[in-house]
Image (tube, helix red, strand yellow):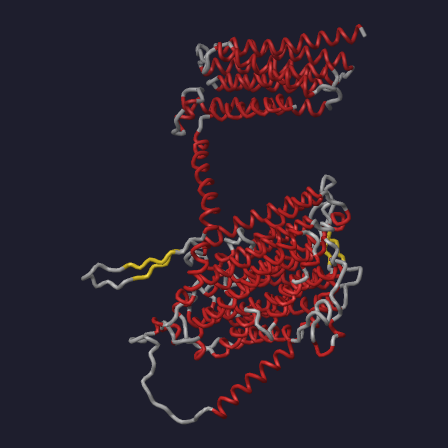
Amino acid sequence: MQMHSLAFDVSHTLAGGLVLISFMMLYQDRLYSLLNVFALHAVVLALSVAWQAFVQHAPHLYITAAIALVFKAIVIPVALHRIVKQLGIHRDIESAVGIGPTMLAGMALVALSMVLMLRVTAEADPLAREDLAFALSVVLLGLLVMVTRRNAVSQVVGFMSLENGLVLAATGAKGMPLVVEISVAFSILIAFIVIGIFLFRIRERFDSVDVSALDDYRGERR
Amino acid sequence: MSPVVLQMSCVAGLLGIAGLAIVLSRAKSSTAIIYGLTMAVSLVALFGSVRSLLGGVPNGSELILPIGLPWLGAHFRLDALASFFLVVVNLGGASASLYGLGYGHHDPAPHRVLPFFPAFLAGMNLVVLSDDAFSYLLCWEFMSLASWALVMAHHRERGNAKAGYVYLVMASFGTLALLLAFGLLAGPAGDYGFAAIRAAGHTPYAATSVLILMLLGAGSKAGLLPLHVWLPLAHPAAPSHVSALMSGVMTKVAIYGFIRVIFDLLGQPIWWASVVVLILGGITAVMGILYAMMEKDLKRLLAYSTIENVGVIFASLGLALAFQANGLKLAAALAFTAALFHVLNHSFFKSLLFFGAGAVLMSTGERDMDRLGGLIHRMPLTSFVVLVGCVAISALPPFNGFVSEWLMFQAVLQSPELPQWALKITVPAVGALLALAAALAAACFVKAFGVTFLGRPRSTAAETAREVDRYALTAMFVLAGLCLLAGILPGLVIDALSPITTEILGGRMPIQANVPWLSIVPIAESRSSYNGLLVMLFIAISASLAVFVIHRFASHALRRGPAWGCGFSDPTPAAQYSAGSFAQPIRRVFGTLVFHARDHVEMPAPGDIRPARLRIELHDLVWEGMYQPIAGAVGFSADRLNRLQFLTIRRYLSLVFATLVTLLLVLAIWS
């Protein structure tokens, strides 16, 4: 019982930490710092997944944790760093919506996901319940990042953090097959590659990765 | 070969002919080959279905094909009801093919008609044969699409594109309703086989919803008010032999669907369901024939008259439901037989009349009655058979229309036996509506025949008309003969229909073969009976006697005097009664209420040499009050939603995000 309570507390802390880091992402207005925060996000995710593997005695989850650590915490942030450098946008400051409203919206979203998840999953295992509530918060915050940003790179980061939320949800539920997690990880990797290629394409064409340049090209009003 | 296998082989044959037609479409002799083959296959299917209707259907009349849904397969089954409707379908198909042998040569684009004609017939056969909801809907859509292609055959003619569009929209709507109805019938277990649906019990709530959905789905195909709007546009737009099939046969397939679901699958009906069907049927009958009365386009008039007849059939079905719900088996069998008999009759005379309209169109190129006239001198044979059709559809003895309407009124007269007061009042009221419709139908067809075939020609096209070819004439004469036969030997038809009433309602009318002198007795001899043969003999003898007396005893002295000009000083053909002027009294009586009809006389100012004009203003209230607002609302919201096409990427993302959050909020508040 003591062990169970400890397991619960640690996983609760890690998932809560993930939500907290998502909040940190919301107010980073420089790309490098955003990427660093994202790397931190992925590290916490890897820790959380590893802890789940330990608690659930599910060794395959260690693989998921390793994938998260290698790809999301190292490969993707490094690659994005290089992209940002190559594109020469590391000095850009951008935020479509002010920090204050964004933070307020983020809090509202977390409140919503808590209320909803705790009510919907009333009979589920308390560990999975908390996990799912945090995971939904992370997903919604990731979406919020995507919506409030104008730069394509930061939208990619938002998307990636959204996916972290999905992985958190998947590992929280017991008995999720490894195949599903690996395929999710790979699909994210492929999405990253495709988006990376597109970033350069957009850049070549428009001399900017501000997606509003695309809208101008389409001849549309904003 | 078991009966259902025979029918399915015929369907396969028809589909094969459709494929052949695609290959042959540009060949010179393709018309003769395709229609000839279609007629042969339809005749085989006709004889097969007549045999299984008369000889009873053996138990092994099911066929399961391994196509369609993987766990279900495609079920096909032949029972008495299906056999009867196959008779209707294939008789129509055979006669239309025979007619097409002649008519098809006048078609400017045969390759647009030939492949779809046998496919359309195959679709109708399949709908009647199918025995699970999935095959039923699939075949129903196949039938609709094939007929839509036929409507669009002459797509460059004015109005046809609109007709096709309205038809497509209404057909999709109808199928949606059917889809929901079958979904409800299958229930949460989701077994779509008709046998399973029949065995499962249905709650009153589900039964009510199914009834409403079937009235929408089958009713829109059959032409029930207010879902009839596509019918007078689409039926005349097709080539005439296809119009005959659509009006005479396809509406019957829709009625088959209604009977199959409401009477067969749903089990014991609820009494007030019949009130809905009765009232809808009665109103449809009267409105349909009033629309027909106002019409001057011959084929559109016939299409509106189809709506009237569908109303009559639905009213009879409503009667059958009312009696069945109260356990009055004999009366229910009487009303149901009347409905089926009318289905058969209408397929005879409506096909015949559309063939006649096609013959007129073929030899004059005109559908507008105000540009026809005097055709009885140029097309005597066509005029004769069309006259037979008009008499039959006006429900005059000794033809078949009278028998079915008489049976229906006999059923109306049984209404005092019903326990519910609502029915006791509704049934006679609907009976009065039906009587009104019958009288108006007679007036309408006096107008149709009189303006088209009598008087003097109103255009050179009508003046130079020539009799049509022998194939078309043969087809029309066969149907006219059937109208007469069914009229003077109704007992045979009623006995042939009795297996269906036994199967569906569990009751039947008295055996008519035992009644002496070929009379028919709906309930008991002491109450009423009818003898078509006797009536025909009486009419023939009294008419001959009258002619004899006139010729024998009237004065033979020759008198010369000024011809009475009927008040016309300048008797041009245009001064004859036209379609509009013939309908004027009825327009005065009903039109102000039903059509908001107004007559405007436009008098020129003094000194102006323009002629004065009489302008008639008619409003289709169903179209203006129901369809135009819907179309307007759809257009309005489409215009507003059009902006969504041109948003920025971030706006799209925000929309997705907002939708997600809203859904989550709804879930959080409601759960």
The answer, for residue B74, to whether it is visible in the render is no
Residue located 40% across and 56% down the image: B597
**Residue A192's x, y, as percent?**
56, 22
Q: Quadrant of the N terminus of chain B?
A: bottom right
Q: Quadrant of the C terminus of chain B?
A: top right
**Residue A200's x, y, as percent?**
47, 22
Q: Nearer the viewer, residue B497 or A113?
A: B497
Q: Nearer the viewer, residue B178 or B602?
A: B602
Residue located 57% across and 52% down the image: B220
Q: In the shown orientation, is residue B253 left or right of residue B385?
A: right
**Residue B250's x, y, as percent?**
59, 59
- B36 relative to A202, above or below: below
Q: In the shown orientation, is residue B228 left or right of residue A170?
A: left
The answer, for residue B626, to whether it is visible in the render is yes
Q: In the shown orientation, is residue B350 left or right of residue A200?
A: right
- B440 relative to A153, above or below: below
Residue B544: quarter of image: bottom right
Q: Nearer the viewer, residue B69 or A193?
A: B69
Q: Please identify the residue farthest to the bottom as the structure is shown.
A: B557
**Residue B669's x, y, as percent?**
61, 22
Residue B50: quarter of image: bottom right
Q: Nearer the viewer, residue B76 or B432?
A: B432
Residue located 50% across and 78% down the image: B381
Residue located 46% across and 34% down the image: B641
Q: Please identify the residue farthest to the left as the structure is shown.
A: B607
